[in-house]
Image: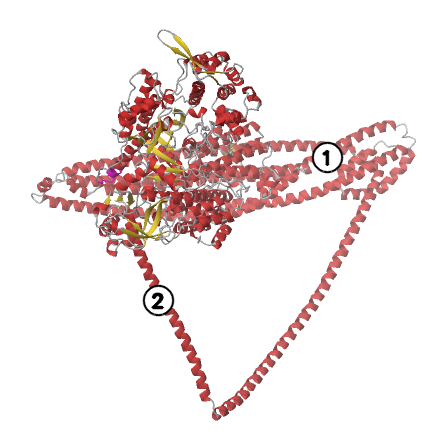
């Protein structure tokens, strides 16, 4: 459509303004072609008739939906006011400092520290395509790196702008991005001045890692050393002016601030106000800058670069000498002469610091030497000339020092390897124009002309590539070519060459040079002008603007000469650094070398002679040419830095200054070039999504969206020249998108009007219906009242009274009837209640009667108990009395000592016989062990035979396959001769089938023979089991005989111990044999099953091999005709069909036979499985009985441990007896002499003894168990003949007897208890024997009893680690296995080493285990399943070491059986700590792998994917990505995220990961999802909309539902999504009033103030009906949040890891029940 048609009512335009450059106005009346005025209304409400030229109407304003775009070229109307307004909205309202303009990144200096440069931001931009996220310097750096890695081509990032625009900071951040996101090279503080340009090459190796860097400098502003102005026209970020006035270089002020430090006192410096070179510009102090602290940082930086303290001090001496040189006072002596005092303090300090001759320096500062062909003349200089010479010397020294420092920095950043590629960062001054422009500004603008030319060519090239890529016809675009300006400056007889020529003349002056310029270029070159009011300046028309240069000082600055005499003095300096600066062959100060061969596209102008190479202009031109050659050989990326205002106020936008800079830096030129072609470029999908509302139903019914877009555009925009259809995009000319937006807005407005009409109509109808309903109700009540009044009369009153009487009597009757019913019910309830109470009382009386009876019996029992206790007490008294009587029988017991000795000898002989019996039993036990070994060998031989048979079967199968192949070959051969060999083929088929049948029969016979052999072997095993039973019964019989022989406690207990040891061993032997039997049966069944499967496969393959259709297809038409000549083909076909039917019937019959056999075998298998289940049930029941018996045996065994103590006590008694006998013998000898004297008395005692013998015999019979002790006591009385000695001996005997009596009673009680236990155990053994005999006939085998250990050999450690750790695959383990099975097996091996008490073996095994886990984790560091598996097993292994450590805190949940399995000898707490650390390392790697897998899905799934269909959360931006920014990422949805989470969850569950650890891992994953999504939201302005908030909230609900489904609500994972949830809520909530601001502050507690403000500033409406967040509302929220104390950073740390805890969870699995699967290949381990 015509452009004039867009100037309609409500559209807005831009009109020029003196203050704001452009001002917005709204059209109040439609414009018609030919009108001279445009009626508009300004934003302040002023009505205006704006005069217009119909050929140049004012520029249109873009719709609000397009305002704030990330890329200026995405605007529909591309012109200066649109660019300015877009930048202002982004900078002032959204606080966004970066904006794209095609391939340019526009960076506006905020003059404020922003939280957008942290490591989190770097990681967020790493790997992203340019344009996927908000504009940023990091995005440009990432794009450069990706293009370098993808195209293997060098890159350049060109950063330019005015002083103070932030060039140095931008370049530093770009280099920091490479150092952080790409490599690990050194990163130093770049504190160089913006008053020089620098090109830094960052070198990369073949893996694209940083290996080093190099820097090249351009045009150092040396004049700043000796002169600064106070105009404040230049603002430098890092080194130059920071205050209102200019300063010298920072290092001078840092030295002065540190003058009082001890290390700097020898420099003899003072305040900066004391030196001429530091006080010219005004104030020497910058607010907020600490020069002393910065000096410390400078020293640290030097040290970081490897520059030691001595070198640093030499540099500082040079700088201090420059300051002192500036204070050297030069006085005038007349008009033609000048002098310096010898006593000048600063001169002497200068010479002292540089070790110079002060006299010579004082002389030659005021004189110069003129050398002619004949003589040398010394000429005095005026004071002005002397001051210039002094300043020239200072500049020269500083220039050499600066170059030397750059050289040392390059040396520090050198790299040993070879550079593969590089990325260059050019930090160079932008176009400058001041009130007074001199030689420096001329060189700067010359450099910018060259860069602008290169930029224009590159933009033109990219545009051409884009058109060619989309197959759009290329039309030449007119763009500004600044080659004439460049020729004016650098061509032959150009400005620079004329300047160099004038410098060669002895008396050349600035005025002469300027006159030459006037003569050569005025009125001859349109780009050169002479000012009207000046004869000392000239004007050059640059691409950006006209610049007036003042010629004063051009020659002096270009020459940059110092008198030779002063140079000679400095050469003679004894200060080596100063002397080296001025040698004839100095070392190269810029050792820059490119690793690629480059060739300039244009010839570089060469100086005509050698002298010109020494001028500054010549040097600068050469270095600039080299720079351009380098840049042309790389892919450039542009960053244009803009200074928003001259007052350095944060986020203040001066439109005039910004517009001036945009013109100067080429941004507007880019916009102009884009506007001439097709600036707006949308994909077909974006166009369809945005403008589907403009499409008809017929158009939408098409399936091809691309075709729909073409049809719609042809209908909406009649002029086909206004758009072009590319392969993937639609290209629009300027203004067409705005026109489409107008159409869309108009249609939406009409739709809104229609909706409003319908809604308002419905509301009015609803209101009318309610009013009508109310009126009807009022009428109803009114009419009712009127009817009542009409109905009242006398008759009506009588009828009413009669009705009342009737009602009274009726109601009375009803009430009486109800009362009667209630009365009857009450009486009935009372009757039942009273009966219940009577019965209750009766039962109570009965219970009391029974209680009396119980009391009677209880009291009787208590009385009997008291009587028994009294009787027992009396008996004890009697016993003690009888023991006292025993003292009287001492003499008689002496005679019986001989009998006691004989009995002792008999006992000894009996003991020897028992020992022989035990040895025989041991020999029999060894025989049984040998038999078990033979059985094991037989089992292994049988296993080998089975394997050989299986190999034979496999060989037979191979033979069958080979036969099949031969059949196929034969079939192919016979098809060629079908007619001749049809009968032979049929016979061959029958023969093959017969062979197969015979082979099958042979195999079945072999199988039957094998089965018979197996049954025979099983019979033999059963016979051997019966023999073992008989041997067991014989052994039991022998044991019983031995038990009968043993009368004493000692032999009985020994026999019982032998029985207890034999029974478990015999049971184990039986169980082993039965287990072998089961294995044999299983192998036989497996072999049968394999044979059936192989036979079925052979049959199927045979049937499938005869493909007659294939045979028919192979015959050619000629063969068919030949065969069918006489009808033979028909007969052959009929014969073939008959043969086929015969074969099919034969195969079908064989198949039925096989199926019947298989069914029979299946029935047998089912029957056997039922029998096995029944036997297993019986076996479990018997196991329960056996467990009880085992517990009883173990208890008895523990009690038998008391037997050695009893034996020891018996031996002690025997020793005491012998001692007493010896003492008695000695006493007998002594008392022989007194025997006669006591003869008569003894006779009386003997008579008394005889009278008491009867009673003593009765006591002896009642105390047979005390016989041995009593005899020992009685033997003490032999030889007693005297009364005195006898009394003494009796007292001792009495004491010893009482002691022995008490001990004997205890022994009797223990023996009685043992007798009862033995009887009970014998009964249980008999029962067990009978049960085993019954069960053995049915149960094939019994399980062994294990103690939870794995026996292994020291040399098997490597095999264990290899098979159990290194070669183990998780997927083969987790199925049908207990969690942590490898960990339990490892711990069982640890228990075995602990059981052996072998510390070396234990340490070795633990070390190799930990090393094995480390190795497998390292080898599979990216395998999630392997990491999950070994995290789980390491955790279980650690818990096993704790659970069985023997420590009480870990044994609380153990079963008694588990407590028995605790470690006995070693404390493994140190290894537990090592394993804990290893588990933490595995967990961190495990989490890292999960994060790496899910991180690419988060942003597409959580932010970009639209879960709510029909609610688009994004608007098409039309951003033009670079051709190299290929979107190679997969398309992920929210389903992808949920599927990945489910995969993680299922894998962790399958590997048996502890639920607490699983919850921690899920929490970490959800934190990552929330953090990455929120960080991306902060960096993507296009995502900050109300609809996108709804989409994010929906996606969060999916995650919460997933947590609920997996029962993970307690993992606190939901809380980690709270910041993202609040951000989504913030996007949806209303943001207008104070209440809205208060609600935001109260609700968004998980977001920081910076984050809330960022979201509010980034909020972007998708439709025109939404409103932007006003800056006043943002400030209001910011003020409410000012008291909140939270972190200032914007981004969340996605690398943050929650602290992991490993809870102790005891294993419920008993070690005795754990079995090792055969797939582990650990057959060399033995369960104990």
Secondary element type, mark 1: helix
Farthest left residue? 1126
Q: Is residue 596 visible?
A: no
Q: Position of residue 887 (x, y in %)?
A: 84, 38
How much space separates mark 2 and mark 1, taking CA atoms? Answer: 119 Å
Front residue of this view, candidates 1486 and 7 = 7
In the displayed structure, would residue 708 be above or below residue 420?
A: below
Q: Which residues are magenta?
A: 466-472
Q: Secondary structure at mark 2?
A: helix
Q: How many marks?
A: 2
> Left of 1200 or right of it: where is 965?
left
**Residue 1373: x percent and y percent?**
44, 39
Q: Earlier in the sequence, mark 2 or mark 1?
A: 2
Q: Is residue 469 magenta?
A: yes
> Which residue lies most toward the front here?
334
Local crowd size for mark 2, using a 10 Å CA cut-off: few (<14), some (14–19), many (≥20): few
Q: Nearer the viewer, residue 410 or 330?
A: 330
Instruction: Count residues near mark 1 (Cα–Cα under 10 Å), then give few for <14, some for 14-19, many for 20+.
Output: some
Q: Quick check: can you spot residue 1229?
A: yes
594 lies above or below 462: above
Asked whether, in this view, residue 1475 is left or right of residue 410, the answer is right
Q: Quadrant of residue 70?
A: top left
Which callout, 2 or 1, points to the residue nearer the camera? 2
Q: Is residue 1420 left or right of residue 982?
A: right
- Residue 612 on image: x %, y %: 32, 18
Note whether 844 is above or below 672 in the view shown: below
Q: Is residue 991 magenta?
A: no
For mark 1, what is the residue? 1210
Pick the front one: 1553 or 223: 223
- Residue 1046 quadrant: top right
User: Residue 761, labelled with which disc?
Assistant: 2
């Amino acid at each position: 459509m015509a452009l004039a048609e867009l100037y309609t009512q409500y559209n807005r335009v831009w009109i020029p303004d003196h203050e704001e450059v452009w001002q917005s106005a709204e059209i109040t009346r439609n414009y018609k072609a030919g009108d001279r005025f445009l009626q508009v209304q300004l934003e302040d409400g002023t009505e205006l008739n704006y005069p217009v030229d119909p050929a140049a109407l004012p520029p249109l304003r873009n719709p609000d939906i397009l305002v704030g775009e990330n890329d200026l070229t995405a605007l529909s109307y591309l012109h200066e006011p649109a660019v300015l307004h877009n930048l202002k909205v982004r900078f002032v309202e959204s606080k966004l400092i970066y904006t794209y303009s095609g391939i340019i990144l526009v960076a506006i200096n905020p003059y404020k520290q922003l939280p957008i440069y942290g490591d989190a931001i770097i990681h967020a931009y790493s790997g992203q395509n340019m344009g996927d996220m908000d504009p940023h310097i990091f995005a440009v750096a990432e794009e450069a790196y990706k293009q370098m890695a993808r195209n293997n081509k060098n890159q350049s990032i060109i950063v330019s702008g005015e002083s103070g625009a932030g060039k140095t900071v931008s370049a530093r951040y770009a280099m920091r991005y490479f150092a952080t996101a790409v490599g690990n090279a050194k990163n130093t503080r770049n504190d160089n001045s913006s008053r020089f340009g620098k090109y830094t090459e960052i070198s990369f190796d073949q893996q694209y890692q940083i290996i080093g860097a190099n820097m090249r400098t351009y045009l150092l502003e040396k004049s700043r050393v000796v002169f600064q102005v106070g105009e404040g026209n230049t603002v430098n970020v890092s080194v130059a002016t920071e205050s209102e006035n200019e300063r010298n270089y920072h290092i001078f002020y840092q030295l002065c601030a540190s003058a009082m430090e001890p290390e700097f006192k020898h420099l003899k410096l003072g305040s900066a106000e004391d030196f001429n070179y530091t006080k010219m510009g005004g104030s020497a102090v910058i607010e907020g800058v600490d020069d002393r602290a910065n000096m410390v940082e400078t020293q640290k930086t030097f040290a970081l670069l490897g520059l030691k303290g001595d070198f640093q001090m030499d540099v500082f001496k040079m700088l201090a000498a420059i300051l002192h040189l500036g204070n050297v006072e030069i006085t005038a002596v007349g008009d033609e002469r000048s002098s310096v005092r010898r006593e000048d303090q600063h001169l002497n300090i200068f010479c002292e610091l540089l070790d110079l001759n002060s006299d010579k320096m004082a002389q030659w500062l005021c004189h110069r030497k003129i050398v002619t062909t004949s003589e040398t003349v010394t000429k005095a200089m005026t004071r002005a000339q002397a001051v210039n010479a002094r300043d020239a010397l200072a500049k020269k020294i500083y220039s050499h020092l600066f170059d030397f420092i750059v050289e040392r920095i390059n040396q520090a950043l050198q790299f040993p390897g070879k550079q593969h590629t590089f990325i260059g960062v050019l930090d160079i001054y932008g176009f400058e124009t001041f009130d007074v422009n001199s030689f420096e500004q001329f060189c700067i603008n010359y450099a910018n002309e060259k860069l602008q030319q290169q930029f224009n060519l590159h933009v033109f090239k990219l545009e051409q590539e884009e058109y060619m890529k989309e197959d759009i016809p290329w039309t030449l675009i007119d763009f500004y070519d600044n080659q004439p300006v460049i020729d004016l400056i650098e061509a032959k007889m150009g400005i620079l060459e004329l300047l160099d020529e004038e410098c060669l003349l002895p008396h050349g002056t600035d005025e002469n040079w300027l006159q030459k310029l006037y003569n050569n270029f005025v009125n001859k070159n349109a780009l050169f002008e002479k000012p009207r009011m000046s004869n000392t300046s000239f004007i050059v028309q640059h691409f950006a603007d006209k610049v007036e240069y003042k010629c004063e000082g051009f020659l002096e600055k270009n020459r940059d000469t110092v008198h030779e005499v002063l140079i000679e003095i400095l050469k003679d300096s004894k200060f080596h650094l100063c002397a080296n600066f001025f040698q004839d062959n100095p070392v190269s100060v810029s050792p820059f070398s490119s690793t690629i061969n480059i060739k300039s596209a244009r010839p570089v102008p060469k100086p005509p002679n050698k002298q010109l190479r020494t001028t500054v202009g010549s040097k600068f031109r050469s270095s600039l040419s080299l720079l351009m050659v380098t840049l042309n050989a790389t892919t450039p990326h542009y960053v244009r830095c803009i200074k928003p205002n001259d007052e350095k106020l944060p986020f203040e936008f001066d439109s005039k200054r910004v517009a001036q800079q945009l013109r100067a830096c080429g941004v507007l030129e880019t916009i102009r070039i884009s506007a001439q072609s097709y600036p707006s470029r949308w994909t077909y999908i974006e166009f369809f999504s945005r403008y589907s509302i403009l499409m008809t139903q017929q158009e939408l019914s098409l399936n091809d969206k691309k075709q729909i877009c073409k049809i719609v555009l042809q209908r909406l925009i009649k002029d086909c020249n206004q758009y072009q259809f590319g392969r993937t995009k639609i290209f629009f000319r300027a203004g067409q998108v705005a026109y489409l937006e107008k159409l869309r807005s108009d249609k939406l407005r009409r739709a809104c009007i229609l909706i409003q009409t319908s809604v308002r109509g419905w509301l009015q109808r609803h209101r009318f219906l309610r009013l009508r309903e109310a009126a009807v109700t009022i009428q109803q009540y009114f009419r009712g009242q009127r009817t009542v009044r009409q109905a009242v009369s006398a008759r009506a009153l009588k009828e009413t009274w009669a009705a009342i009487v009737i009602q009274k009597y009726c109601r009375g009757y009803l009430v009486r009837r109800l009362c009667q019913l209630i009365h009857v019910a009450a009486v009935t309830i009372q009757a039942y209640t009273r009966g219940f109470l009577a019965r209750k009382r009766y039962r109570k009386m009965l219970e009391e009667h029974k209680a009396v009876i119980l009391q009677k019996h209880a009291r009787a029992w208590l009385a009997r108990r008291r009587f028994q206790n009294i009787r027992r007490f009396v008996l004890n008294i009697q016993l003690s009395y009888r023991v006292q009587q025993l003292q009287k029988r001492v003499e008689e017991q002496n005679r019986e000592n001989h009998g006691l000795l004989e009995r002792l000898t008999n006992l000894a002989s009996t003991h020897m016989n028992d020992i022989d019996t035990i040895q025989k039993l041991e020999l029999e036990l060894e025989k049984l062990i040998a038999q078990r070994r033979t059985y094991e060998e037989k089992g292994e031989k049988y296993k080998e035979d089975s394997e050989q048979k299986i190999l034979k079967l496999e060989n037979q199968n191979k033979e069958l396959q080979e036969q099949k192949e031969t059949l196929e070959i034969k079939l192919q051969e016979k098809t060629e001769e079908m007619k001749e060999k049809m009968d032979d083929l049929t016979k061959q088929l029958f023969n093959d089938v017969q062979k197969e049948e015979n082979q099958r029969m042979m195999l079945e016979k072999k199988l039957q023979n094998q089965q018979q052999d197996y049954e025979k072997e099983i019979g033999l095993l059963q016979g051997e089991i019966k023999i073992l039973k008989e041997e067991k019964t014989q052994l039991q019989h022998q044991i019983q005989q031995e038990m009968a022989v043993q009368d004493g406690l000692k032999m009985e207990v020994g026999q019982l111990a032998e029985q207890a040891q034999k029974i478990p061993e015999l049971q184990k032997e039986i169980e082993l044999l039965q287990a072998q039997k089961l294995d044999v049966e299983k192998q036989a069944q497996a072999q049968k099953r394999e044979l059936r499967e192989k036979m079925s496969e052979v049959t199927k393959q045979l049937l499938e091999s005869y493909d007659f259709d294939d045979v028919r297809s192979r015959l050619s038409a000629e063969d068919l005709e030949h065969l069918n000549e006489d009808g033979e083909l028909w007969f052959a076909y009929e014969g073939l069909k008959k043969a086929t039917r015969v074969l099919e019937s034969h195969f079908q019959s064989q198949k039925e036979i096989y199926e019947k056999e298989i069914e029979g075998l299946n029935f047998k298998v089912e029957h056997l499985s039922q029998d096995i289940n029944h036997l297993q049930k019986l076996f479990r029941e018997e196991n329960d009985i056996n467990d009880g018996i085992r517990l009883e045996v173990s208890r008895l065994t523990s009690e038998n441990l008391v037997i050695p103590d009893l034996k020891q006590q018996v031996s002690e008694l025997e020793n005491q007896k012998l001692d007493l006998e010896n003492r008695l013998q000695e006493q007998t000898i002594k008392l022989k002499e007194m025997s006669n004297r006591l003869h008569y008395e003894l006779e009386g005692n003997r008579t008394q003894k005889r009278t008491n013998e009867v009673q003593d015999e009765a006591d002896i019979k009642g105390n047979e168990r005390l016989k041995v002790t009593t005899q020992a006591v009685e033997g003490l009385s032999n030889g007693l003949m005297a009364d005195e000695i006898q009394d003494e001996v009796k007292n001792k005997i009495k004491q010893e007897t009482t002691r022995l009596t008490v001990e004997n009673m205890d022994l009797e009680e223990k023996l009685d208890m043992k007798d009862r236990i033995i009887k009970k155990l014998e009964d249980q053994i008999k029962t067990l024997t009978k049960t085993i005999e019954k069960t053995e006939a049915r149960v094939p085998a019994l399980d062994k009893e294990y103690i939870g250990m794995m026996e292994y050999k020291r040399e098997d450690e490597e095999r264990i680690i290899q098979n159990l750790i290194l070669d183990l695959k998780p997927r083969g383990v987790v199925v049908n296995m207990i969690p942590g099975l490898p960990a339990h097996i490892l711990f069982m091996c640890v228990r075995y080493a602990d059981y052996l008490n072998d510390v070396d073996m234990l340490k070795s095994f633990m070390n190799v285990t930990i090393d094995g886990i480390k190795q497998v984790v390292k080898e599979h560091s990216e395998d999630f399943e392997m990491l999950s598996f070994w995290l789980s097993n390491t955790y279980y292994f650690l818990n096993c070491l704790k659970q069985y450590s023997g420590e009480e805190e870990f044994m609380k949940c153990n079963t008694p059986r588990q407590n028995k399995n605790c470690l006995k000898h070693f404390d493994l707490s140190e290894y537990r700590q090592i394993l804990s650390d290893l588990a933490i390392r595995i967990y961190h790697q495990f989490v890292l792998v999960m994060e790496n897998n899910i991180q690419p899905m988060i942003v597409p799934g959580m932010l970009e994917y639209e879960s709510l269909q029909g609610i688009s959360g994004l608007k098409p931006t039309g951003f033009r990505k670079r051709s190299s920014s290929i979107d190679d990422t997969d398309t992920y949805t929210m389903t992808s995220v949920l599927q990945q989470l489910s995969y993680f969850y299922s894998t962790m569950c399958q590997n048996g990961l502890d639920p607490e650890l699983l919850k921690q891992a899920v929490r970490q994953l959800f934190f990552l999802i929330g953090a990455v999504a929120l960080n991306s939201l902060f960096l993507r302005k296009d995502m900050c909309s109300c609809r996108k908030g709804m989409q994010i909230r929906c996606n969060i609900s999916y995650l919460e539902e997933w947590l609920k489904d997996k029962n993970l609500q307690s993992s606190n994972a939901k809380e980690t999504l709270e910041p993202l949830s609040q951000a989504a809520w913030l996007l949806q909530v209303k943001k207008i009033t104070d209440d809205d601001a208060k609600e935001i502050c109260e609700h968004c507690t998980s977001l920081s103030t910076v984050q809330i403000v960022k979201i509010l500033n980034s909020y972007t409406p998708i439709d025109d009906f939404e409103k932007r967040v006003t800056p006043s509302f943002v400030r209001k929220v910011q003020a409410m949040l000012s008291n909140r104390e939270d972190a200032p950073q914007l981004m969340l740390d996605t690398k943050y890891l929650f602290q992991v805890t490993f809870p102790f969870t005891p294993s419920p699995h008993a070690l005795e029940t754990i079995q090792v699967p055969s797939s582990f290949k650990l057959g060399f381990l033995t369960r104990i």
